[in-house]
Amino acid sequence: MTATTTRRGPGRQDLPRQPARRTRLASHPGRAPAPLTTRIAFLAPAAVLVMVLSLAPFVMTVWRSFFDDSLVDPHFNGWGSYARIITDPVIVRSLVNTFFWLIGTVAIPVGLGLAIAALTNSVSWGKYARLAIVMPYALSGTAVAVIWNFILRDDGALNGLLEGLGLGSLAHAWLLEWPANTIMLIVANSWQATGVAVILYLVGLQGVPRETIEAAALDGVAGVRRFFYIVFPQLRATTAVVMGISLANGLKSFDLIWVLTNGGPGRATETLAVSMYWQSFVLQRPGSGAAIAVILTVVVVAVSVGYLRRQLRTS
């Protein structure tokens, strides 16, 4: 009988230690910067596109806002369009509605998105709940308006549910009285926008180190205290992104309002975006429409700059 021998490779501890890998950036000197003309040549197409598609229309809108509402041969009237719209009670209510939208479309999606993501992150059935909440985000604003019109009209699902529960006294003409109609529009918009907040917060929760959670558990910190003292501070960057997206969605909301209420009744649910469309294309007042567009731009820039400065200062 011939003895068989097996060849065994060296153990893990016997392997020669590999030299440490060095990064290419560390082993090679930095590249010389490209000439100024080359950099300008690369930047020129993007700069031209921004000027033609963004800056030029804005400058033309500002210029048009200083003329009257004549469609042919308009005359320069200085601040006349601005003075007229800021004294118009419809535009004043539109400005109030816009600030309602700013508050509601930030607070509701951020709060609900954080709560739903935290509550469904560690349970087995959470994926089904998240799917039901994220699905409205795939719908267009027009489809959301049609669904909520079925819910909120006088003979709609909400009033039918209240009457079925014996709470018929709470049935209401939800879209006919201000500010209840504006609040219901904000709720409908938040129903759609909460999905993206849930997705972003879930991504943020996946990035929280497990060691941090385990260390907090060993120290006896659990439940709500662990979430608000340990987890939530690490979601600051995610919260900044969610709030930025919610601000943009709230300020540019148009299709949901237009399809669901057409800005009414009596133009009571208009925001600045809807008022701009109404003045420019329905009433054929281009000077007033341009002035509202400038005011809306100032509001958007002021809110965005204030928000970004706060976030950068916090960082």
Image (cartoon, rainbow, N blue to C red):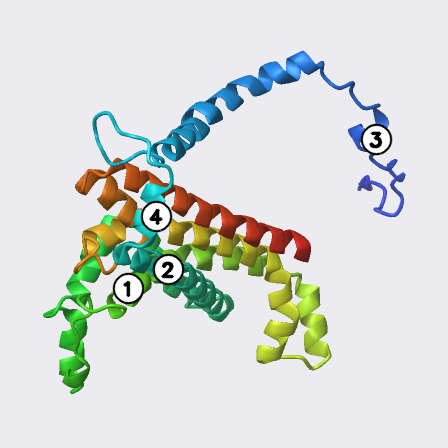
Looking at the rendered structure, the kind of residue marked 3 is Ala
Residue lying at 48% horizontally and 27% vertically, measured from the top left: 50
**Comes first in the chain, label 4 or label 2:** 4
Looking at the rendered structure, the kind of residue marked 4 is Ala
Residue 26, disc = 3
Of badges 3 and 4, the one in the foreground is: 4
Residue lying at 50% horizontally and 52% vertically, measured from the top left: 303
Find numbered disc 3 in the image and state the secondary structure of the residue it sits on. helix
Looking at the rendered structure, the kind of residue marked 2 is Trp
Residue 182, disc = 1
Which of these two is toward me, 226 or 146?
A: 146
In which quarter of the view is residue 196 placed? bottom left
Alpha-carbon span between mark 4 and mark 1: 26 Å
Of badges 2 and 3, the one in the foreground is: 2
- Residue 136 picture location, percent across and down: 31, 56
Alpha-carbon span between mark 2 and mark 1: 8 Å
Q: Check contact, mark 2 vs mark 1: CB within 8 A.
A: yes
Alpha-carbon span between mark 2 and mark 3: 51 Å
Pointer 4: residues within 10 angstroms few (<14), some, or many (20+)? few
Pointer 1: residues within 10 angstroms few (<14), some, or many (20+)? many
Of badges 4 and 2, the one in the foreground is: 4
Pointer 2: residues within 10 angstroms few (<14), some, or many (20+)? many
**100 shown above or below 5:** below
Which of these two is toward me, 3 or 173?
A: 173
In which quarter of the view is residue 310 placed? bottom right
Is residue 134 visible to the viewer in this orientation of the structure?
Answer: yes
With 111 as the anchor, is 153 left or right in this view?
left
Q: Check contact, mark 4 vs mark 1: CB within 8 A.
A: no
